[in-house]
């Protein structure tokens, strides 16, 4: 899930050329940063994202709010989530996690499984209140994440081009996260250049993995809302209930 590879990140779907190591608007902070994750199955490819305003990046407010949520999970006696664990939506939905106490059982009890599933609901509730942050989703028919990523980047780029505003995006497909500049056209950029920008290194770098966790919660729960998988019936209405103001889904 790292966004700090030593080589320039390729475009998510191979459709956008890699830009030079310098951002075109390096001296002008972007109005927005999109942190997105792709989810879905063979029927639907769905992207979920957090759209974070510059002030929330600079103040670290969104990062701090998610870190506070993580800390609450570490200290929750009903769970056994440890510092350094990555919160993966699919595993939580399946009730996967450590048992609370040493046991001969091969996995958590039913009560513990529901505790892990409920982490998704708790996370969506936190996401709804992230400072300076809105939520959005987009979907395409079929399971081609690369094509969905390319279409999403183009759609977001066109939106900001029409507004005359600049924006950056971090988009994760599978386990790889790549940086993009969205204006004047989508272009992949060297993540080293992103880390050197003061408004990124000061307010975002340390918390990027957490924001990607949050975006994964959005993408996965939105997918379950639309896909209506019977074995995830409990998830069907959590997304619209807890994030009623989410943008989309944009049809790609």
Image: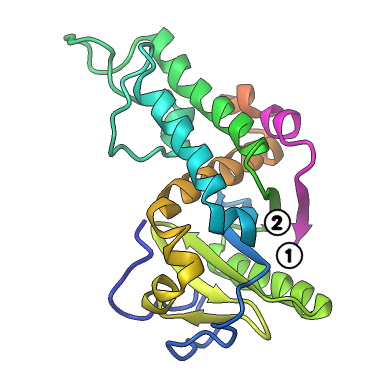
Q: Image height check: is 66 above or below 145?
A: above
Query: Which secondary structure, mark 2?
Result: strand
Q: Nearer the viewer, residue 26 or 175?
A: 26
Residue interval drawn in magenta: 237-252
Residue ID at (41%, 24%)? 73
Q: Is residue 142 left or right of residue 119?
A: right
Q: CA distance from mark 1 to mark 2?
A: 7 Å
Looking at the image, do the residues carrying marks 1 and 2 touch, with CB atoms under 8 Å apart?
A: yes
Q: Is residue 43 left or right of residue 165?
A: left
Q: Image height check: is 72 above or below 147?
A: above
- Quarter holding the N terminus? bottom left
Find disc 2 in the rendering and name its residue. Answer: 138
- Quarter holding the C terminus? bottom right
Residue ID at (57%, 67%)? 169
Q: Give how far across and how far down residue 200 sits, in percent.
A: 48, 66
Q: Give how far across and how far down residue 245 sits, in percent.
A: 79, 41
Marked residue nearer the N-terminal end (1 or 2): 2
Residue 165, quarter of the rendered image? bottom right
């Amino acid at each position: 899930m790292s966004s700090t590879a030593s080589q320039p990140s390729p475009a998510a779907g191979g459709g956008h050329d890699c830009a030079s190591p310098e951002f075109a608007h390096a001296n002008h902070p972007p109005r927005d940063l999109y942190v997105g994750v792709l989810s879905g199955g063979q029927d639907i490819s769905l992207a979920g994202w957090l759209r974070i305003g510059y002030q929330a990046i600079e103040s670290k407010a969104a990062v701090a709010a998610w870190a506070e949520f993580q800390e609450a999970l570490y200290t929750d006696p009903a769970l056994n989530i440890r510092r350094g664990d990555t919160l993966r939506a699919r595993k939580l939905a399946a009730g996967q996690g450590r048992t609370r106490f040493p046991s001969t059982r091969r996995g958590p009890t039913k009560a513990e499984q529901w505790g892990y599933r409920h982490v998704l609901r708790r996370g969506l509730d936190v996401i709804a209140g992230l400072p300076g942050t809105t939520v959005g989703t987009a979907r395409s028919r079929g399971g081609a994440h690369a094509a969905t990523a390319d279409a999403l980047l183009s759609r977001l780029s066109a939106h900001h081009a029409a507004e005359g505003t600049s924006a950056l995006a971090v988009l994760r497909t599978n386990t790889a996260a790549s940086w993009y500049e969205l204006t004047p056209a989508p272009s992949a950029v060297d993540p080293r250049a992103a880390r050197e920008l003061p408004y990124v290194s000061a307010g975002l770098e340390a918390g990027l993995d957490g924001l990607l966790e949050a975006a994964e919660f959005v993408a996965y729960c939105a997918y379950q809302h639309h896909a209506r998988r019977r074995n995830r019936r409990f998830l069907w209405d959590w997304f619209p209930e807890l994030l009623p103001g989410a943008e989309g889904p944009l049809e790609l």
